[in-house]
Every structure is written in C-alpha cells, then in structure tokens.
C-alpha cells in the first residue's frame, strides 16, 4: 500500500515546494504584438526578451492594455522586477492599478524597474511621469538621436568615449545605435551610463526644417542609458534603444551585480577586546572599529575586497561634525558565522577617541554609484576622566618646576627658623641686663 502512495506523496511534496526564483513582470505592447509569437517582435525587442528568458527567473507577460495589469496587491508588490518594453500607445487600460503612484510604491517596496524606450515608443504618461520624478526626461515619440559625422546610415556609431565611467556596464554589445535620448536632472541618486556623441542632436526629423522646438538635446547633454538607485537600494534603468540592454545591465537592475551587504559591525576598546560594542568610552581611549562586507555573486555571498581606491570605505566618528574621518584598512577575508564559509572581507580602523566628551556616533555611510548603499550608525557615550583617573602631579613634567619651588620654600623656611632660633648673635642677653 505504502509503495503505491510513495510516488504520489513525492509529487505532492514537489508541488508544495515553493519556487524561490525571482518573479519579473514584462509589460509589452499587446496591440501590436502577440506574445505567443515572439518572432514577430521587432528584432531588437525580441533580443531583449530572449535575454530575459535565458535568466533563471520566472517571467510573467502582460500587455499595456490588459485589464488585469497590476503590480501591487493590497499595497504589496506581486513581482520582484518590472520590465517595460516599448509601446507606441500612450494609454494604459488598467490605469487605476498601474499608474505613477503604484510605480512609486513598487520602488518603495524595493521593486526594480527596467524601462526600454525606442524611437517609435511614446511611453505611457504614467511611466514618463515616474521617469521625470527621478529626473530622467526622455525625448517625445519620433525623436531620434542623429549625428551627421559619426553615423552608419541611420544609426549613430558609439565608441568607448560614449561610455561614461561607471560600475554597471563595461562595454557595448552593439555599437550602432538607433534610438532616442534623454536629458537628466542633477539628482544625486541618478548616474549616466552612456552619453550621446559630441556632434549629435536629438530631433524629430519630420518634413519641416529643424528648429529649436523640435530638438530635445544637443551633443553630450543627451544620455542614452541612465541608472538610478533609490535610497532603499531599489534600482531603475532607462535605455533609449533595446540594443543597449546588455546582460550586465539586466544583472544590475535585477540585483545580481554590485550588491553589497554589511555582515557585521563591531567596535571595542583596544585595552579590552573581550567587551564588544561597549556603550561607554572615555576620552582618549584607543578605539578599534571593524566591519565585514560581502558581495553577492552567482547566488552566494563572497568577500568584497576593494581594488579601486574610489570605492574606499570610510568611518566617521562624529558629534554633529565628524571629529575623525578615517579610511578603513583591509584586514582579510573571514567568515561571518562560526564554522561558516569565508563570506566577507574585514576592514578596520584604529583611532584615538577625541578629547571631548558627549554623545558620539560611529558612522559608516558608503554611497557609490551603482553599488548598494551601506549605512550603519552606532551611538556611544564618551565620558571625561573620573576624579581618580587624572595623572598624579609627579607624572606631569611641567609641574616639576612648581613642585621644586614649593619644596625649596619649605626647606628655606625651615633653615631660616633653625638659623633664627639657634644660630647667631649672643649680645641679646647683654642688652637686657
Ligand atoms: C592601535 O593603535 C595603537 C597606537 O598606535 C597600538 O598601540 C595598538 O596596538 C593598535 N591596536 C591594534 C589592534 O591594531
């Protein structure tokens, strides 16, 4: 009997096992294309879909005009990631469930968004509004990046000069670019990845002559690919053409690249290392601060060793202002759990607590474009010396002169008294007689 039940049981267990893979929603133009037949998609967009399908994540496809298009369910996100493919239609059918506010809530709940634009794409107003909110201003429909010097037919030729130094994308998969451009604001959470060529303009090439009204960007003020990372580390990327969607970019948006984690933070006094994270320090104590940082790579946490000096981790010891701001020194890889694998890299700082008592904070605030932000604050009290902790007077060399002069006065006075009483003239007696 049991033998008959066993296979049944097994399949039941398998069905119950939760699929822990990430879930991404891909929104496409369902009026122009049929997702069952990916072959009819524009070649570049099809390429993006192929790239997504190669990933180890679950994909759900919905059209912009599907009535059941939603990203939140009772204000909780249904998906981990969102990919918005180009569409030439401006409207979203399920506007009550997919709009600027729900997109913002999605980001607030750590959702990641990849927006793929192209020349013919209008991007629905709500998507455009969320992009504008983070500071990306894509050109309107039918605007195209043109460059009469560096072009190959209609497409603009990109070179490594166009790649803004960044930590997300290191090379182009295709150098010929047929797409649109955006101007960006100075939002500090935003960083450009690819910029337009020097002699390019973004323009609506209609029949009429080019005027200022029909140009969007000039030269290098136009950007073709832009990244944004919110303070909660949710990521968003916008590209002006599907050809710029590289595997590196997808990995970055989907939190597989440049993801850091603070495994532990410890501070202690040099003289009592057994007492971890004390809440009380004394002025001029020698303090040691150590942290362990991991990086996510291929599904596991590995030590994060900094090679690039611009990524230097820093510690501030501050009370309103930083009294100390120190570069953390590398110590070596370590395990964050006892008997665990070596999964983090340890950094430390060794410094003297300032000669000032009050409430101080050990603050690690690491914000680098394209990397997970690391923030940690530990508040401690720094007290002044207790009555019996001051140096004795004889330990202070400056006091030696005063101590000597005081002793000399005492000795001189004793000598004087002795001299006055027992040494000296004998005619006193004679006078009295
Ligand atoms: C910290 O620095 C002090 C003074 O330079 C030194 O005596 C001490 O050994 C250092 N401690 C560690 C753990 O490096």
Image (cartoon, helix red, strand yellow):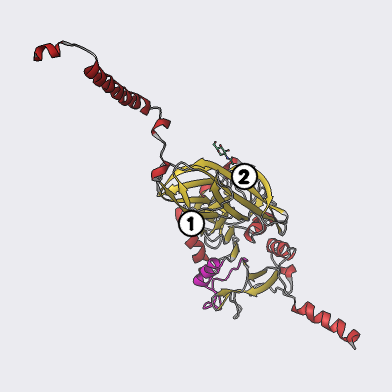
Closer-to-camera residue (222/249): 249
Residue bearing the label numbered 2: 150
Closer-to-camera residue (391/2): 391
Q: Is residue 277 above or below residue 18?
A: above
Image-based side of 229 in relation to 406, left or right: right
Image-based side of 418 in relation to 134, left or right: left
Residue 319 at x, y percent in the picture? 41, 49
Q: Badge 1 local density, few (<14 within 10 Å), some, or many (20+)?
A: some
Task: Classify mark 2 as within 8 Å of ligand 1 or not, answering yes or no.
Answer: no
Q: Is residue 227 above or below residue 321?
A: below
**Residue 82 placement: quadrant:** bottom right
The magenta stretch spans residue 134? no
Residue at 74 percent across and 72 percent down: it is 37
Question: Which quadrant would the N terminus be assigned to in this image?
Answer: bottom right
For the record, the magenta segment spans 83-109
Q: Is residue 239 above or below residue 158?
A: below
- Alpha-carbon span between mark 2 and mark 1: 21 Å
Residue bearing the label numbered 1: 214
Image-based side of 325 in relation to 146, left or right: left
Residue 247 at x, y percent in the picture? 69, 56
The magenta stretch spans residue 96? yes
Image-based side of 398 in relation to 27, left or right: left
């Amino acid at each position: 009997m049991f033998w008959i039940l066993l296979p049944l049981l097994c399949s039941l267990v398998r069905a119950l096992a939760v699929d822990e893979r990430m879930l991404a929603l891909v929104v496409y133009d369902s009026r122009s294309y049929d997702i069952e037949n990916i072959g009819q998609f524009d070649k570049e967009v099809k390429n993006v879909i192929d790239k997504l399908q190669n990933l180890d994540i679950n994909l759900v496809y919905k059209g912009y005009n599907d009535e059941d298009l939603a990203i939140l369910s009772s204000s909780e996100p249904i998906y981990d990631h969102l990919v918005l493919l180009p569409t030439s239609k401006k409207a979203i059918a399920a506007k009550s469930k997919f709009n600027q506010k729900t997109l913002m809530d999605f980001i607030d709940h750590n959702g990641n968004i990849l927006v793929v634009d192209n020349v013919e794409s209008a991007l629905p107003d709500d998507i455009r509004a969320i992009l504008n909110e983070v500071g990306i201003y894509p050109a309107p429909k039918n605007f195209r990046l043109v460059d009469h010097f560096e072009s190959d037919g209609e497409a603009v030729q990109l070179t490594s000069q166009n790649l803004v130094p960044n930590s997300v994308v290191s090379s182009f998969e295709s150098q010929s670019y047929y797409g649109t451009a955006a101007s960006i604001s100075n939002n500090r959470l935003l960083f450009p990845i690819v910029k337009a060529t020097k002699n390019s303009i973004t323009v609506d090439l209609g029949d009429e002559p080019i005027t200022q009204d029909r140009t969007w960007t000039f030269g290098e003020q136009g950007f073709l690919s832009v990244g944004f990372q919110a303070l909660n580390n949710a990521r968003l990327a916008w590209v002006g053409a599907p050809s710029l969607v590289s595997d590196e970019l997808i990995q970055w948006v989907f939190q597989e690249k440049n993801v850091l984690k603070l495994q532990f933070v410890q501070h202690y006094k040099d003289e009592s290392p057994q007492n971890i994270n004390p809440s009380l320090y004394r002025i001029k104590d020698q303090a040691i601060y150590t942290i362990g940082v991991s990086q996510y790579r291929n599904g596991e946490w590995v030590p994060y060793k900094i090679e690039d000096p611009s990524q230097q981790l820093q510690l501030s010891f501050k009370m309103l202002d930083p009294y100390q701001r120190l570069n953390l020194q590398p110590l070596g890889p370590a395990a964050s759990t006892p008997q665990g694998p070596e999964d983090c890299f340890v950094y430390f700082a060794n410094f003297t607590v300032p000669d000032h008592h009050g409430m101080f904070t050990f603050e690690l605030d690491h914000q680098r474009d394209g990397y997970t932000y690391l923030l940690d604050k530990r508040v401690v009290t720094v007290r002044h010396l207790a009555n019996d902790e001051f140096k004795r007077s004889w330990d202070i060399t400056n006091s030696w002169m005063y101590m000597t002069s005081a002793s000399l006065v005492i000795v001189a006075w004793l000598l004087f008294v002795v001299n006055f009483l027992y040494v000296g003239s004998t005619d006193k007696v004679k006078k009295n007689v």
